[in-house]
Amino acid sequence: MTYGTPPTSLQFCDEMTLSLCGPFTTAQLPKIAPDPVTVTVARTVLVGHEAQYLRWADEVVATLLTVHGCLGAGVLHPGPDSHEHQIVFRFVDGVHLRAWEKSPERAALMARAGEFVVAERVQRTVGVADWFELPQRAEPKRSFSNRVITDVLWVYPVAILSSLFVAPRIARLSMEVRVVISSLLITTAMRLAVNPLRTRLRARRTL
């Protein structure tokens, strides 16, 4: 089955990534985009319709997350120097992305977007080795002192638990050994429990 006109060639959008541009045939997709494809859609919203757009964007993300082959999706809000709202999503390959782009679910959502979207810009990138972590991209810039205070507040409960339950059991060991054990346990807890929790909380604020 073929969509659009004959396939076009890939074009460099910069030195590091490839852009999947123009129409192409479904048969060529496994060769063109066998790797995950990230799509960034930037939209300018009609003034006064931001709340309507955000409800619609949440519905788009919720729908995307149910689509086979979708690896993730989320909303990026405009920064201080931008008026564009962005939806970013990632598919396992170009075949699954093309299926979504031709789906009736997407068509129905896009039809409604015409009520409040005045401009749209789409970027598809293929073969990006390190896809950004969406919540980190969406998180607003904070001062150094603010970041330090936040990090301390997250480490503090872990340190308290370590002092209550671990320190008494290793009290007879030398100071050097106690410090190594405590540092190892706190670092492990931060990486395996605290950092994933922070990521999920950021995602809930963003999506």
Image (cartoon, rainbow, N blue to C red):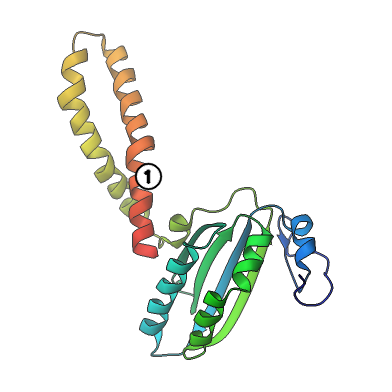
* Image position of 186 with respect to 100: above or below: above
Numbered disc total: 1
Residue 198 visible to the viewer: yes
Work out whether residue 70 or residue 148 is closer to the camera in this orientation and state it. Answer: 70
Work out whether residue 101 or residue 74 is closer to the camera in this orientation and state it. Answer: 101
Rendering coords of residue 120 (x, y %):
58, 81
Horizontally, residue 34 falls left or right of residue 118, namely: right
Q: Secondary structure at mark 1?
A: helix
Rendering coords of residue 5 (x, y %):
81, 77
Residue designated by label 1:
196
Horizontally, residue 149 falls left or right of residue 100, namely: left
Label 1 Cα crowd, 10 Å radius (few <14 / some 14-19 / many 20+): few
* Image position of 110 with respect to 33: above or below: below
Work out whether residue 63 or residue 79 is closer to the camera in this orientation and state it. Answer: 63
Outermost residue on the front side: it is: 1
* Image position of 111 with respect to 86: above or below: below
The quadrant the C terminus occupies is bottom left
The quadrant the N terminus occupies is bottom right
Residue 142 visible to the viewer: no
Rendering coords of residue 17 (x, y %):
71, 57
Rendering coords of residue 87 (x, y %):
51, 70
* Residue located 79% across and 55% down the image: 31
Q: Amino acid at mark 1?
A: Pro
* Residue located 61% across and 77% down the image: 121
* Residue located 26% across and 13% down the image: 175
* Residue located 57% across and 59% down the image: 90
